[in-house]
Each structure stands twice: as C-alpha cells, then as structure tokens.
Image: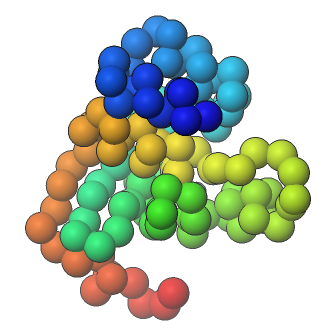
C-alpha cells in the first residue's frame, strides 16, 4: 500500500498507478479516480470534504461520514478499509488535485 501512495506522490497519476488503485480498491478506486478528475475534493483549514450525492467529511485519510464507511467498512473486520471518498482524498492530497478553501469547515457542521 505504501508503495502505491509513494508512486503516486512521486510520479503522479500514471497508468501504472491507476491500475494499482483499481486492482486494490476495485469500484471504489474507480469512483475515487473519477471524483478527483471531476474536481470533487475540497480542502478546508480543518477538514477534507468530498462532494458526492452530498458532502462527506474525511478525517485522517480514513474516517468518513458516508454510509458506506459506517456500514460496510468500520463495522466489519475484513474487506475494504477505505470508502471512495477517503481514497479520493489520498489521491487528491498527493497530486494537489483539490480546491483549497481558507475557511473552517466545522462551522458548517450541525452535528458530529
Ligand atoms: Zn465515504
């Protein structure tokens, strides 16, 4: 896994890196790559946000507020360890493919 993210950081999104992401994360990887291409990733002062059907908050490149993370990932001991939002954030931060905001996102959170 480290190899994959190191390659991405050094070489950018090459076809090789892309196929590594797809073979490791399958459909979630594909959605992440597409999401980054469509500029769906936002970096606030405090949090990363991915725009899907709604806005999801990703923390520490892992925890996410989406139902995929809640029901399919965090509640199971095995299987995928990241939802597509978290994968997208990992890609975006290493390729600088995100929109930066000089604001604090927590102000928009009504509950967390
Ligand atoms: Zn998610």
Residue situated furthest right in the rendering? 77
Q: Position of residue 91 (x, y in %)?
A: 42, 37
Does 21 appear above or below 110?
above
x 38%, y 60%: residue: 49
Q: Is residue 88 visible?
A: yes
Q: On the picture, is 9 further left or further right than 58?
A: left
Residue nearest the observer in this picture, 19 or 35? 19
Height in image: 8 above or below 83?
above
109 left or right of 96 in image:
right
Residue 29 in which image quadrant: top right
Which residue is the extreme one toward the bottom? 111
Residue drawn at 35 percent across, 30 percent down: 9
Color scheme of the displayed model: rainbow
- Which residue appears farthest toward the left when viewing the image? 102
Give how far across and how far down residue 35 sits, in percent.
43, 37
Q: Tell me if 98 is positioned left or right of 24 in this view.
A: left
x and y, in percent, of residue 90 in the image = 44, 44
Q: Quadrant of residue 64?
A: bottom right
Q: Is residue 53 visible?
A: no
């Amino acid at each position: 896994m480290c190899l994959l993210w190191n390659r991405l950081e050094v070489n950018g999104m090459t076809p090789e890196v892309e196929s590594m992401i797809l073979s490791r994360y399958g459909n979630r990887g594909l959605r992440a790559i597409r999401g980054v291409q469509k500029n769906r990733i936002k970096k606030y002062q405090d949090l990363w946000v991915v725009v899907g059907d709604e806005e999801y908050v990703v923390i520490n490149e892992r925890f996410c507020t989406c139902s995929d993370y809640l029901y399919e990932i965090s509640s199971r001991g095995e299987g995928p360890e990241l939802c597509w939002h978290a994968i997208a954030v990992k890609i975006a931060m290493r390729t600088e493919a995100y929109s930066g905001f000089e604001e604090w996102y927590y102000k928009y959170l009504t509950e967390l």
